[in-house]
Image: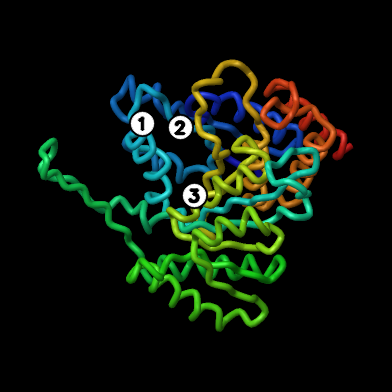
């Protein structure tokens, strides 16, 4: 069976890190086809849009999508985001965003006295509604009376499916689910969120659930990360908390993500979350670990569990023994890290 993986290298350092992710997957000797889609800011400058009109139909013809990074100073951020990844997430209804936060051995953390045993949790972020639903507008533009409205959208069905999935993941891990909320101040959306969490908890006797205000949870992540197993959060809260989590695990270059619709046949989108980093693009120094980790998540999604595990073990070996890029204390290039992971993969499968 050949897996068809659409590759969207994107902007900035995206092509550099995605090339290394592909290299490490190819070292597994799986049957993977890599059709490349030249979407992003260069496409926008030529065509006036970030992707073609039939982009979603094109993606539906693949088993998965490996995405580099989107964003360039020549394109307004809200245009770049809403015309690519947010359109893909909503258009394909990829309602769960998975962000593993693990501190790998050999990677420095800003948390004093913490080790890999202390930092190992998973954030499940609602991915299609909430604060990023795209509902709102502006009127009386450029006048003193100008008004901008951004409406958060919480549906019972949307909250229920991501909360239930988070409970399932917690049941398969250490059995604790932490729900990020702000229902003390947000009287409608997060009150509904809390109600759905409480209702769903009745179906999972083996999972301990706790409701924690998001600001207190951010502090607890820093103070006591070992107390956290699985976090379920809204679109906005999950976005913010996972960037904090990335810093805890060594920086944005280490952070991986999966955009998925569990139980469906829709292709998942797998991407490092460090952004396009135009300030270092072309220098060959970007950390490919997040892209490689995302590729491991992709392989798991494709049913290649053994290969996914082998790739992750190879990444762990290189993080522990080197080489490492400069953002995590080394001096290696992007390609040197990719080569080392690929070599570790090959050695493990002989």
Q: Which residue corresponds to the image point at 49% horizontal and 23% vertical from the top-left?
A: 278
Q: Which mark is residue 171?
A: none
Is 287 left, or right, of 114 in this rendering? left
Mark 2, residue position: 70
Along the line of sight, which residue is nearer the eye, 216 or 79? 216
The residue drawn where x is 72% and y is 52% is: 305
Residue that numbered label 3 is attached to = 240
1 and 3 marks in contact (CB < 8 Å) = no
Residue at the image point whose x is 71% and y is 32% from the top: 328
The secondary element bearing badge 2 is classed as: loop
Quadrant showing the C terminus: top right
Quadrant in which residue 249 is drawn: top right
Residue 344 lies, with reference to residue 181, above or below; the image says above
Q: CA distance from mark 1 to mark 2?
A: 9 Å
In the image, taking residue 202 as reference, residue 127 lies left or right, namely left
Question: Which mark identifies residue 50?
Answer: 1
Question: What separation in Å lies between label 2 and label 3 (alpha carbons)?
Answer: 18 Å
Label 1 with label 2: CB-CB less than 8 Å: yes
* Location of residue 176 by image quarter: bottom right
Disc 1 or 2, which lies upstream in sequence? 1
Of the residues tagged 1 and 2, which is closer to the observer? Answer: 2
Depicted 98 relative to depicted 67: above or below: below
Nearer-N-terminus badge (1/3) = 1
Q: Nearer the viewer, residue 58 or 96?
A: 96
Give me the C-alpha separation between circle 1 and circle 3: 25 Å
Which is in the foreground here, disc 1 or disc 3?
A: 3
Can residue 150 be seen by looking at this rendering? Answer: yes
């Amino acid at each position: 069976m050949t897996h068809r993986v659409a590759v969207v290298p994107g902007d900035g350092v995206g092509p550099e890190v995605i090339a290394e992710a592909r290299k490490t997957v190819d070292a597994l000797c799986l049957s993977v086809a890599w059709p490349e889609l030249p979407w992003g800011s260069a496409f926008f400058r030529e065509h006036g849009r970030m992707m073609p009109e039939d982009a979603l139909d094109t993606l539906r013809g693949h088993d998965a999508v490996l995405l580099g990074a989107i964003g360039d100073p020549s394109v307004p951020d809200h245009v770049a985001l809403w015309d690519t990844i947010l359109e893909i997430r909503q258009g394909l209804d990829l309602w769960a965003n998975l962000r593993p936060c693990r501190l790998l051995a050999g990677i420095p953390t800003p948390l004093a006295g913490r080790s890999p045993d202390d930092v190992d949790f998973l954030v499940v972020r609602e991915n299609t509604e909430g604060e990023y639903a795209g509902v709102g507008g502006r009127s009386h533009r450029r006048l003193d009376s100008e008004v901008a409205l951004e409406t958060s959208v919480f549906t019972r069905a949307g909250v229920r499916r991501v909360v239930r999935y988070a409970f399932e993941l917690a049941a398969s891990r250490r059995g604790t689910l932490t729900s990020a909320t702000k229902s003390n101040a947000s009287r409608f959306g997060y009150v509904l969120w809390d109600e759905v969490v409480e209702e769903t908890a009745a179906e999972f006797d083996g999972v301990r659930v706790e409701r924690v205000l998001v600001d207190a949870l951010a502090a607890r992540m820093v103070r006591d990360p070992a107390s956290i197993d699985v976090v379920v959060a809204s679109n906005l809260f999950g976005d913010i908390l996972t960037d904090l989590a990335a810093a805890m695990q060594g920086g944005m270059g280490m952070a991986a993500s999966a955009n998925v619709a569990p139980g469906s046949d829709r292709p998942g989108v797998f991407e490092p979350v460090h952004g396009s980093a135009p300030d270092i693009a072309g220098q060959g120094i970007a950390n490919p670990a997040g892209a490689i980790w995302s590729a491991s998540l992709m392989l798991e999604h494709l049913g290649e569990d053994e290969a996914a595990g082998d790739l992750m073990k190879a990444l762990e070996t290189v993080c522990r023994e080197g080489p490492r890029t400069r953002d995590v204390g080394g001096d290696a290039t992007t390609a040197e890290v990719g080569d080392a992971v690929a070599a570790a993969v090959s050695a493990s499968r002989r």
